[in-house]
Image: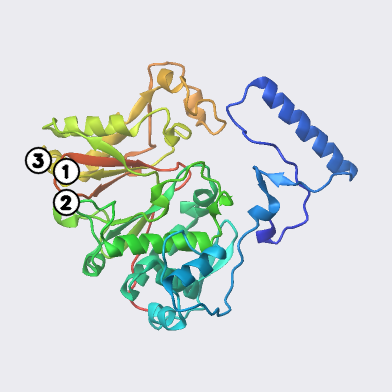
Amino acid sequence: MGAQGVSALPLLVVEHPLGGERPEAIARRAQQAFEQLNAIVAGSARPAQAVGGLSETARAPHAESTDPMTVADDPMAVLEAFTQRNWADGLPIIAPTEERVTAMLGGRDGGQSLGMMPPLWRQVTLEKLAVNAVMAGCEPRAFPIVVAAVEAMLDRAFNLYGVQATTHPVAPLLVVNGPYGRELGMHGGSGCFGPGFRANATIGRAVRLILLNVGGAWPGRYDMATQGSPAKFSYCIAENEAASPWGPMATGDTVTVYGGEPPHNVNDHVSTTASGILTTLCDTAVSLGSNVGWYFSQSQLLVVLGPEHAKTVADDGFTRADVQRFVYEHARLSLGHLRLGGMWGMHDWPGWMNAVADPAALMPQVPSPEDVYVVIAGGSGKHSAVIPNCTFSRAVSRPIRTGHD
């Protein structure tokens, strides 16, 4: 709240965990909260000493600084200085010297603001983006993609506040389309989600450093992901447009940002039909433990078809729209199965689903075929992937502008 200009508010602290508790534990927490509320109203409450197991000092945001700093011209000294200030992600960085930042900006106005970034609601200037892009190892030619990705994340539909602060292991996945990414060396072939490709790795890492250093969401401090995931280091690919039987997911030079879980592998070496492969894929997409069980039928789903699976599907006459329709109609769980556990009973459950009585009724994972995104990526092999989203975030696309507009 202090980040939004509201401070000195009394805190009513409810200890974790907040869910999955038995009635007696809930009653005890309610009594504790009631006693705190009485003390606040009476004016006798003392400041809360801890929230979520971390002291207020430990949870204090690391400071932003625009002042130049002097560090020995040594990679380890730079890493140590930035790590001490909580400005690095744990990996070696490139020192963001004035010359390098200026080169990254490429003539753009560093003071231009794109808006405010949660959870600490700090100004997002192009200079800040350039600093983090340098640290991540980006080439200056990659900067327009970083800017477009941040613009997409700041769209209200993406709900960056939720993505940053949730306990879910969500990370913004960047999917780049168009010739600009290819010219830069972005990779959408074999091993595209893994290491070995500078453009993918550094652009994705730049976005993560921006979320850390500008947004202020550090693990255990505003980023409350229970376990996190490796995707929070870098999560960025190009679509393998050359292998797509249907053309690109997005036209022109475009970056699409999708708040997703890490990829869930779809292994099907047997199916020779579109329905066979897509049935395997749909079964992989839905489970009680998936976060989509919370907002079942309010989610989005990213389908990442390997080229061999995509060819089999297309050879059966399926279009991209047909794939979307098939997944919408078959990525479902029965009401009776959903009631076994997972997120059943959450207050956010869609009202129309609460009204369904038949335990055999099949509940859709997504609200419409258009909420299924289909991307072609990867190389040889009978593997694809599904990437569920974090349910409260919508995919957003932005054009990659190489000029200074």
* Residue 296 image-quadrant placement: top left
Q: Which mark is residue 81?
A: none
Closest to the camera, between mark 3 and mark 1, is: 1
Residue denoted by label 3: 315
Whole-number angstrom distance, CA of label 3 to CA of label 1? 8 Å
Residue located 20% across and 40% down the image: 383
> What amino acid is at disc 1?
Ala
**Residue drawn at (69%, 55%) of the image:** 57
Q: Is residue 82 left or right of residue 270?
A: right
Q: CA distance from mark 1 to mark 2?
A: 7 Å
Instruction: Report helix, strand or loop for mark 3.
Output: helix
Sequence-wise, the earlier of marks 3 and 2 is 2
Give the amino acid at mark 3: Asp
Name the residue at 47% across, 52% down: 157
Q: How is the image coloured?
A: rainbow
Taking the image as shown, residue 84 lies to the left or right of residue 42, namely left
Q: Is 22 placed left or right of 285 in the picture?
A: right
Of residues 166 and 219, the one nearer the viewer is 219
Specify the amino acid type for callout 2.
Ser
